[in-house]
Amino acid sequence: MTDYADINETLSSGGVLLLPTETVYGLACVAADTAAVDKIYAVKGRDFEKPLAVCVKDLAEAETLGLLDEAARELAIRHWPGSLTLVVKARPEIVLDPRCLSGRGQDATIALRCPEAAWRESLNGPLALTSANRSGQPDCVNYESAMAEFDGELDGALMSDTPLSGAPSTIVSVMGADFKILRQGTLAVTEINS
């Protein structure tokens, strides 16, 4: 699969794809498609209690899904596209599969990721996104090993034309003036704090 139109067509018809980010390969589907989200959990063997990140095209799309305050917006401007996942309060009116959120009601949060990947710019809407590996196994940074891992279980794949870093994205929770590193990844704490 090389045509970005094919990616959107497969996603819109309920497909689950193997897509490269700048860090590792990921499994992706339309975030509002419950059956496709079911498939991601089944293929990965993921615990249903663990929410999925949501891949967005840009900051504007992120702001339709999450309540980004000044601190979160500044981090996004400085580090997106890139290996930063922002956890912020979810907008109450968004229509996504509930497993793309952590918590419910006014306490719901959403993990937003805007990867440095050309395919992201052609997206027609937010994607549920998780690393392409069986739960508990190492992340896939090699296309051939990822395809072998999920042989016949996916609806398409896109191979990266550059090597992936292998380190996961850095996850930062931003709630008001407070922010907390939930997972240290490619992006260093010093870059977050500067």
Image (cartoon, rainbow, N blue to C red):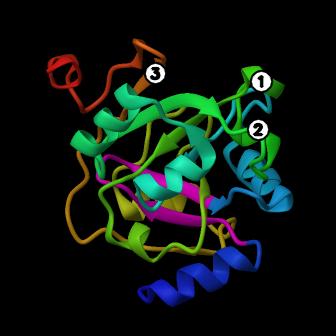
**Numbered badge on residue 148:** none
Kind of element beneath mark 3: strand
Please give the residue where the numbered disc 1 appears in the rendered image.
106
> Is residue 146 placed above or below 151 in the rendered structure?
above
Q: Label 1 amino acid?
A: Gln
Q: Does the magenta stretch include residue 20?
A: yes
Mark on residue 174? 3
Q: What is the C-alpha distance between the residues marked 2 and 1?
A: 7 Å
Please state which of residues 143 and 74 is positioned toward the viewer in this rendering. Answer: 74
Q: Mark 2 points at which residue?
A: 92
Q: Which residue is drawn at 52% across and 64% down?
A: 18
Q: Which of marks 2 and 1 is nearer the N terminus?
A: 2
Magenta-tinted stretch: 15-28
| Cα distance between the residues tagged 3 and 1 | 15 Å
Callout 1: helix, strand or loop? Answer: helix
Q: Which of 31 and 134 is in front in this view?
A: 31
Q: What element carries label 2?
A: loop
The percent position of residue 161, horizontal first and vertical second, equals 24, 72
Residue 87 position within the rendered picture, expressed as x and y whole percent measured from the top left: 52, 29
Kindly tell me whether residue 131 is visible in this rendering: no
Amino acid beneath label 3: Val
Q: Tell whether label 3 touches label 2 (CB within 8 Å).
A: no
At a point 52% along the width and 89% down the height, the residue shown is 5
Q: Where is residue 10 in the image (x, y as percent from the top left)?
A: 65, 80
